[in-house]
């Protein structure tokens, strides 16, 4: 069945003799409800009654009354004013008023003479004010007049001058669109102003102006275009391409109807396409109403009733014209119940999506499926083995024959099939977690898992199974096992809270019992997972397995735990007794990260460093471990010096032994060890600097003098003594050094030290003098301010208040700041002025 916007019926034929046919032909038509009025060429008005729901049976049409206006001149225009039961008639260049039921003249309303055109303005505000506005154009002057029409009067309230006589006009609210012999104009009834729209070259019979409502007009523009113009002068729709021989045009939203000598064409106001044509030979004019159109010839009247919007839309859907159906639905949404509109819109949007889907326009299809809130199972069912078998799903699209399996569709093209799979994954990811996807979350997650496995999308598969999901273990684990996705199986167990099975699965991969080519660093993932688990039983169950493989990495299980899920320290240390490297790292974590001040921890770490240093010294290079040990010995205040000293006393760790001696105050012994046992003069000098850090100059000088004495006591260390003096002339006082130097030494040997020491002493003395001078200047400045303050007079009036406490200054003692504000001495905290 072809699409029809209107149903066409012949509703009336005017009976007359052959001699009267030409004289009594129909000139104009007006309708209100079931009342139809005809104006004829022989100055006659006929009143017809159309029964409700006319189905084309002409015998039911009843001629009610006839009114003969005169002997000549055709009736040019008819308009009803239901508010007052008036029927307004344009005849013999005059507007007259008849009663719309009796067709008797309204006595109180005298004819308005010299009228060329008129139109009534239908407005809700006018009904509330019990008056109607009417616009007329004068046949003598180039003006249009605005009349206020009441039940027994009509008055001219405004005139709007024009440059040319109007040929056609239409009214919408406070705006009139006028067509003249060569142009179209917009006139504002409130201000009286007019604006030119555009010129035209039509004959007077082809000048068409009609109101579309909502402040919009339809005009017969140049080049056979129907132009839509808003009352602001702007165009919001593209022009409509219509035939050249248009006699009349009307609007029955959402359709535009154009009348030609032999055919009536129906265009959509939404997409400007011709939707229907009706053959009507000899048609002269048309009248559009809210539910249809009346078309008249000289003797006949035809009714085009608007097909209900739901039927139109369903017809378009049946012909798979979904885009047109959506446009039409959007245009008529005000005519449908809200729930019905939304359901219809969703259904058609989804069907349009399937059209694009099968055309491989996946981006458009995805957007339409999401907008139409399509149940994801409608798509999943088109893919073999992707719909979970745990629940039966009844498709709502089977009756539209949309259930073509994609695998069958793409049987000979594997690449196309993969494109369809990729689209499904994109669509399911978009709806997952939304209200649309929550209807069938289990099926969505299962389908995504199957898709990722099929496409080899390891990243998205891991993201799906590692985070909260509704994948059924019974269905998904066998699928993953079939494709050797053992790491994903472990992640799936983990996301379902089954941590033991998860880690067991990963352990089997690491131990070589399972082969999974799609994962790497399983061991690191196990350690990271254990470090975050709050289930301590699971952590203890697998901790030893991780420590046996790699102590340095496995200790992260205890070192990188969240603060709120820490283990008992003693339990961890007891476990790590068998794993010295892990023990060392964990003790570092306790001391440097958790700032432990427990002496046992510091002692154990120091002893662990000693053991590690000795082991490293045998194997390769122990510098890194010894550096950590020395830093701990220098900086920690919580280890027991004697305990550590007993451990290093008999070892080759002489630098550490010196540090421990220094911690007990035995700096001389420490320096003896470094100089004579270790033989490292640079280390001895560095020891003095490190031990003197943060101490006063006297202590630093004492350390260096002690080292100097050790150098001087050995004949082989004379040059070292000279170097020590030259390196520290600012610290060592010349008078104390000279007392220690051998008499055999010449002045030239220590001249560099003496010059440096004298310069340092001179610099210190001058700096002290400069500081003293600056202090005297500051003191003098304060004295000047004090003297100036003493010489200042202050006036203390009765009722004057303290700046601090806001109480009266009633005592003779007061204080004053530099800006002159007075306060109590007790408020300022210093003696009175």
Image: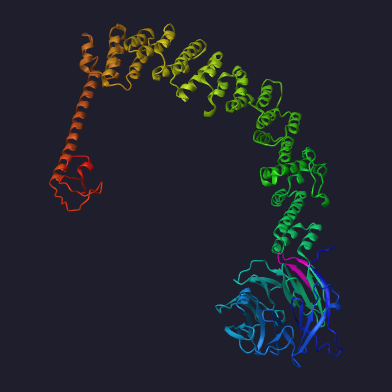
Q: For residue 23, what is the image quadrant? A: bottom right
Q: Position of residue 510 (x, y in %)?
A: 66, 22
Which of these two is toward me, 479 or 724?
A: 479
**Residue 271 forms part of the magenta stretch:** yes
- For the image shown, how many numbered marks are present on the structure? 0
Which of these two is toward me, 181 or 582?
A: 582
Q: Position of residue 634 (x, y in %)?
A: 39, 18
- Against 514, is 145 above or below? below
Relative placement, left or right, of 6 versus 173 is right
* Quadrant of image for the C terminus: top left
> Residue furthest toward the left?
791
Which of these two is toward me, 237 or 174?
A: 174
Which of these two is toward me, 772 or 617?
A: 772
**Residue 494 forms part of the magenta stretch:** no
Residue 221: in sight, yes or no?
Answer: no
Q: Residue at x 77, y 38 (%)?
A: 388
Residue 225: in sight, yes or no?
Answer: yes
Q: For residue 162, what is the image quadrant? A: bottom right
Relative placement, left or right, of 667 versus 249 is left
Relative placement, left or right, of 752 versus 593 is left
- Against 193, is 536 above or below? above
Q: Which residues are magenta?
A: 264-275
């Amino acid at each position: 069945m072809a699409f029809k916007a209107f149903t066409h019926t012949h509703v009336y034929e005017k009976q007359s003799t052959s001699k009267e046919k030409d004289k009594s032909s129909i000139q104009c038509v007006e309708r209100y409800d079931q009342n139809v009025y005809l104006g004829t060429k022989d100055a006659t008005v006929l009143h017809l009654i159309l029964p409700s729901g006319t189905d084309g049976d002409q015998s039911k049409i009843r001629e009610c009354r006839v009114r003969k206006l005169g002997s000549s001149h055709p009736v040019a225009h008819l308009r009803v004013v239901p508010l007052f039961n008036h029927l307004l008639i344009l005849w013999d260049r005059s507007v007259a008023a008849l009663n719309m039921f009796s067709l008797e003249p309204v006595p109180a309303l005298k004819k308005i003479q010299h009228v060329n055109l008129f139109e009534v303005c239908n407005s809700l505000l006018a009904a509330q004010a019990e008056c109607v506005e009417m616009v007329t154009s004068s046949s003598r002057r180039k003006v249009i007049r605005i009349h206020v029409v009441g039940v027994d009067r009509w008055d001219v309230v405004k005139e709007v001058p024009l440059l040319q006589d109007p040929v056609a006009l239409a009214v919408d609210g406070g705006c009139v669109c006028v067509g003249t012999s060569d142009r179209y104009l917009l006139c504002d009834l409130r201000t009286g102003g007019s604006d030119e729209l555009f010129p035209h070259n039509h004959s007077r019979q082809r000048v068409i102006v009609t109101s579309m409502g909502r402040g919009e007009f339809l005009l017969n523009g140049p080049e056979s275009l129907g132009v839509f113009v808003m009352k602001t002068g702007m165009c919001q729709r593209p022009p409509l391409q219509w035939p050249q021989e248009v006699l009349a045009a009307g609007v029955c939203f959402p359709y535009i109807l154009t009348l030609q000598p032999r055919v009536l064409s129906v265009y959509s106001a939404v997409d400007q396409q011709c939707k229907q044509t009706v053959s009507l030979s000899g048609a002269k004019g048309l009248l559009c109403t809210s539910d249809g159109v009346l078309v008249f010839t000289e003797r006949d009247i035809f009714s085009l009733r608007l097909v209900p919007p739901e039927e139109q839309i369903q017809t378009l859907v049946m012909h798979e014209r979904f885009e047109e159906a959506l446009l039409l639905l959007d245009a008529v949404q005000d005519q449908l119940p809200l729930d019905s509109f939304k359901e219809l819109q969703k259904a058609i949007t989804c069907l349009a999506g399937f059209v694009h889907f099968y055309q491989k326009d996946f981006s458009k299809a995805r957007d339409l499926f999401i907008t139409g809130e399509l149940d994801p199972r409608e798509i999943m069912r088109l893919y073999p083995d992707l719909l979970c078998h745990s629940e039966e799903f009844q498709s709502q699209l089977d009756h539209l024959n949309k259930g073509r399996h994609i695998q069958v569709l793409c049987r000979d093209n594997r690449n196309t099939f993969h494109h369809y799979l990729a689209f499904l994954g994109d669509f399911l990811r978009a709806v997952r977690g939304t209200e649309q996807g929550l209807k069938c979350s289990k099926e969505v997650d299962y389908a995504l898992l199957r898709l990722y496995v099929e496409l080899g999308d390891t990243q998205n598969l891991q993201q799906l199974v590692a985070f909260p999901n509704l994948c059924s273990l019974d269905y998904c684990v066998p699928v993953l096992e079939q494709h050797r996705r053992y790491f994903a199986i472990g992640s799936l167990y983990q996301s379902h809270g089954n941590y033991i099975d998860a880690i067991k699965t990963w352990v089997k991969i690491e131990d070589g019992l399972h082969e999974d080519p799609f994962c790497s660093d399983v061991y690191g993932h196990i350690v990271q997972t254990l470090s975050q688990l709050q289930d301590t039983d699971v952590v203890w169950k697998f901790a030893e397995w991780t420590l046996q493989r790699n102590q340095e990495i496995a200790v992260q299980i205890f070192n990188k735990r969240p603060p709120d899920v820490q283990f008992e320290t003693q339990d961890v240390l007891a476990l790590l007794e068998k794993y010295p490297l892990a023990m060392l790292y964990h003790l570092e974590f306790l001391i440097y990260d958790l700032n432990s001040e427990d002496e046992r921890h510091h002692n154990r770490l120091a002893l662990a460093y000693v053991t590690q240093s000795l082991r490293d010294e045998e194997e390769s290079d122990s510098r890194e471990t010894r550096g950590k040990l020395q830093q701990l010995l220098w900086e920690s205040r919580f280890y027991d010096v004697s305990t550590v000293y007993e451990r290093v006393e008999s070892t080759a760790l002489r630098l550490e032994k010196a540090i421990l001696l220094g911690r007990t105050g035995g700096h001389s012994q420490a320096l003896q060890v470094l100089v004579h046992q270790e033989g490292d003069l640079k280390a001895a000098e560095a020891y003095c600097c490190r031990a003197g850090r943060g101490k006063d100059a006297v202590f630093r000088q004492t350390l260096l003098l002690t080292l100097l004495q050790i150098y001087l006591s050995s004949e082989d260390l004379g040059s070292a003594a000279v170097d020590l003096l030259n390196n520290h002339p600012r610290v060592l006082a010349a008078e104390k050094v000279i007392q220690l130097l051998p008499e055999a030494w010449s002045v030239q040997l220590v001249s560099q030290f003496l010059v440096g020491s004298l310069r340092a002493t001179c610099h210190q003395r001058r700096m002290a003098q400069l500081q003293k001078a600056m202090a005297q200047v500051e003191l003098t400045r304060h004295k000047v301010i004090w003297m100036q303050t003493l010489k200042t007079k202050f006036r203390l009036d009765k009722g004057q208040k303290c700046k601090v406490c806001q109480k009266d200054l009633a005592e003779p003692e007061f204080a004053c700041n530099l800006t002159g504000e007075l306060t109590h001495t007790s408020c300022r905290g210093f003696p009175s002025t």
